[in-house]
Image (cartoon, grey):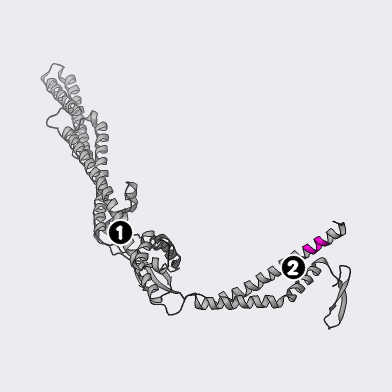
């Protein structure tokens, strides 16, 4: 074999010897490795052939075919009644007052989360006796194996594909359709539980609202009874108009009184008449301002007008708020009771799973090809490892001999 300082001839493009190239350590190692593999090519080919044949026999005789059944589902469309139409626009308002969304049929849980529930898979394992079919050591192991064969996929169109793999094509279709039905059953049960929870929430809030509304109405009634107020803006306007009219009459009477004093003297009967008129008008104005005028009992005392107006507005606001809340809560409460009493199917089946005709696996050609390539590569690595080990032993023996050890 050539050494590190020698050259080896190579063929040029014309088939003639080309100038020799220096044999570098890398080229030398490559030539040595290829030589070793070619020297053991019979062993490599034999082992590869044996592994390939054994893998092929095993894959055909001991690996069963498995089949995949598919069903396509999509979210159900619920045609709501009057309460649905009324409460559909109140979601944000209900959240603001501490209530969760009450429409169990308007929004469904994701089919993937329902499909992966241990409850659903456990029921399927029991129904189709997969503990025995999978030869599982425990029920939990059978559920885990079932989970590996169950799959879900969301398409770009918004549909959801439920698929299941089994060695029996008939059972694969049966399980797939059973899973679709179980998804709706679990969705309906969860929706009912949520509706039951919402009933207690809505009922408590509704009872509180009724109590608050009664309190607000009672306070407003007491205020109206105390001040005789039934429509404060209109009453205030009428009262101010009446006061303005009395002030105008008083001003006119005062002018006539002053003229009478100049013309007839302060002690004349005319002055007495005008003075009496002015005094009566002033007394009337004072009584109205103090709220002591019996004939004007519907008027609020002028000195209390700002305070009464603020109190009146506050009471009216409380009554209005509680009335609005009642308009929101009562339909939601009734809707929750309806949701509890009906089955809410969150999904409808677009395509029912049918018995698959073609197998989904195993792909035996890929398995055999992988076994052939893998065994050849592995055998080559083993030979190179053994050759390298042998080389190290020889070098070590040579070094010991050179050192006289």
Is the residue 193 above or below the residue 167 in the image? Answer: above
In the drawing, what numbered circle is on residue 189?
1
Q: Residue at x 86, y 82 (%)?
A: 16
**Is residue 386 left or right of 135 when viewed as pictured?**
right
**What kind of element bears circle 2?**
helix
**What kind of element bears circle 1?**
helix
Q: Out of 383 and 170, give the one closest to the viewer.
A: 383
Mark sitting earlier along the chain (1/2):
1
**Is residue 343 left or right of 367 when viewed as pictured?**
left
Is the residue 188 above or below the residue 232 in the image? Answer: below
Q: Out of 40 and 72, give the one closest to the viewer.
A: 40
Q: Quadrant of residue 162?
A: bottom left
Q: Residue at x 26, y 58 (%)?
A: 339
Image quarter in which the C terminus is found = bottom right
Q: Residue at x 22, y 34 (%)?
A: 240
Cα–Cα gap, marks 1 and 2: 69 Å
Q: Which region is colored magenta?
A: 393-397
* Pointer 2 residue: 387
Is the residue 142 above or below the residue 303 in the image? Answer: below
Residue 278 lies, in percent from the top left, at: 16, 24
- Residue 336 visible in image: yes
At label 2, counting other C-alpha atoms closer than 10 Å, the crowd grade (few under 14, some 14-19, many 20 or more) is: some
Determine the main secondary structure of the stretch shown in magenta.
helix
At label 1, counting other C-alpha atoms closer than 10 Å, the crowd grade (few under 14, some 14-19, many 20 or more) is: some
Image quarter in which the N terminus is found = bottom right
């Amino acid at each position: 074999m050539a050494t590190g300082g020698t050259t080896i001839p190579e063929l040029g493009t014309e088939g003639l010897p080309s100038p020799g190239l220096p044999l570098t350590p890398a080229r030398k190692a490559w030539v040595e490795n290829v030589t070793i593999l070619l020297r053991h090519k019979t062993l490599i080919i034999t082992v590869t052939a044996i592994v390939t044949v054994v893998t092929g026999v095993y894959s055909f005789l001991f690996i069963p075919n498995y089949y995949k059944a598919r069903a396509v589902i999509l979210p159900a469309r619920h045609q709501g009644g009057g309460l649905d139409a009324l409460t559909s626009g109140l979601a944000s308002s209900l959240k603001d007052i501490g209530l969760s969304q009450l429409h169990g049929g308007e929004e469904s849980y994701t089919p993937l989360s329902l499909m992966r529930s241990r409850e659903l898979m456990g029921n399927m394992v029991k129904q189709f006796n997969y503990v025995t079919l999978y030869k599982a050591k425990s029920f939990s192991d059978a559920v885990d194996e079932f989970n590996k064969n169950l799959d879900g996929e969301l398409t770009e169109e918004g549909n959801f594909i439920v698929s299941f793999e089994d060695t029996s094509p008939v059972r694969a279709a049966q399980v797939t359709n059973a899973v679709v039905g179980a998804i709706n059953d679990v969705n309906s049960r969860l929706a009912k539980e949520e509706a039951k929870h919402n009933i207690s929430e809505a009922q408590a809030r509704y009872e509180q609202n009724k109590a608050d509304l009664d309190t607000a109405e009672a306070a407003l009634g007491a205020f109206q009874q105390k001040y005789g107020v039934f429509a404060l803006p209109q009453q205030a306007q009428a009262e101010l108009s009446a006061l303005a009219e009395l002030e105008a009459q008083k001003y006119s009477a005062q002018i006539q009184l002053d003229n009478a004093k100049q013309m007839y003297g302060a002690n004349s009967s005319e002055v007495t008449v005008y003075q009496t008129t002015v005094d009566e008008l002033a007394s009337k104005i004072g009584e109205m301002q103090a709220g002591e005028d019996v004939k004007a009992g519907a008027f609020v005392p002028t000195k209390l007008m700002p305070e009464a107006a603020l109190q009146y507005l506050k009471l009216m606001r409380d009554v209005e708020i509680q009335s609005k809340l009642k308009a929101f809560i009562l339909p939601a409460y009734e809707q929750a009771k309806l949701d509890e009493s009906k089955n809410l199917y969150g999904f409808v089946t677009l395509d029912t799973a049918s018995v698959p005709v073609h197998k989904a696996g195993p792909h035996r050609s890929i398995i055999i090809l992988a076994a052939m390539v893998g065994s050849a590569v592995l055998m080559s690595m083993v030979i190179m490892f053994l050759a390298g080990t042998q080389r190290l032993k020889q070098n070590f023996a040579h070094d010991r001999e050179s050192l006289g050890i």
